[in-house]
Image (tube, rainbow, N blue to C red):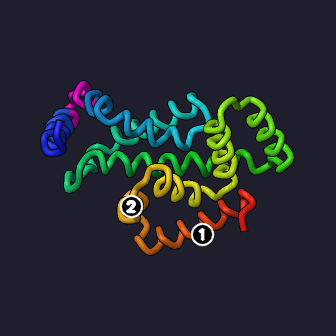
Amino acid sequence: MDAETQDTSDERLISAALAGDDQSFAQLVTRHKRRIFGMAARFARNSDELDDICQEVFIKAYENLRSFRQDAPFEHWIMRIATRTCHDALRSRRRENSHDTLEDHSSELRDYAEEARQEAREARELLRWAMERLKPDEQLIITLLELEELTVREAAGLTGWSESNVKVRAHRARKALKQILGGT
C-alpha cells in the first residue's frame, strides 16, 4: 500500500473509530504495531516490558484520538506518542535502579559475556549495558539518531526539541557513551 492510500485509509479508520467503531481502531493498531514494537524493543529489557510499553502507547493513542488534528500522517502522531512513552519508561527505570551499584552491573555484564555465543550478541549486550548508564534523554537521542537512523529533523519532530537542541544533546550523549565504553 502506498503512503497516499495508507493516509487515506488511516483517515477513514480514524473517523470510524471516533464514531465508536472499535474495530477500526483495532485495524489502526494492526497496521502500525510493527513500527511501534520495533522502536519500543530498543528500549525494553524483556518481552514483558516491551508488551507493557506498547500497550501504553496504544492506550494513550485511543484515549487521545480526538486530539489528532490530521495535519500530519497518523504514523507520525503515534510514533511521537511512542517516543514519549519510551522516554517515560527509561526515566522510570532509572529511578527504580538508582540504588544499584556499579559492582552489580559489572557482574551482569560478565554473565552476559559468558553466555554469549556470537560476537554480534556480545556487541548488542555491551551496547545495552552502556546505554543503561546514560541519562534517559541521552538514551532516547542515541536510539533515535543512531539505532532508528532518523534524521535530526525527524528526531526533533518526535521529541518536540528544536533541531539545534537535538544536535547538542546528540553530541553530549555520544561523548558520554564514549566515556562509558572507555574511549577518550
Q: Nearer the viewer, residue 11 or 40?
A: 40
Residue neighbourhood size for the residue with mark 1, other residues' Cα within 10 Å, grouped as few (<14), some (14–19), many (≥20): some
Residue sitting nearer the eye, 149 or 73: 149
Question: On the picture, is 175 further left or further right than 7?
Answer: right
Q: Quadrant of the C terminus?
A: bottom right
Horizontally, residue 20 falls left or right of residue 171, namely left
Residue assigned mark 2? 151
Give coordinates of residue 73: x percent, y percent. 23, 49
Q: Residue at x 38, y 51 (%)?
A: 80
Q: Quadrant of the N terminus?
A: top left
C-alpha gap between disc 1 and disc 2: 17 Å
Q: Is label 2 in a helix, a strand or a loop?
A: loop
- Residue 172 got which mark? 1
Q: Is residue 175 left or right of residue 73?
A: right
Residue 18 covered by magenta stretch = yes
Q: Where is 121 relative to 158, above or below?
A: above
Residue type at the position of mark 1 = Arg
First in sequence: mark 1 or mark 2? 2
* Secondary structure predominantly adopted by residues drawn in magenta: helix
From this viewpoint, is residue 14 visible?
yes
Q: Say which residue appears at 64% left-offset and 43% top-offset.
A: 123
Between 147 and 166, the residue placed more toward the observer is 147
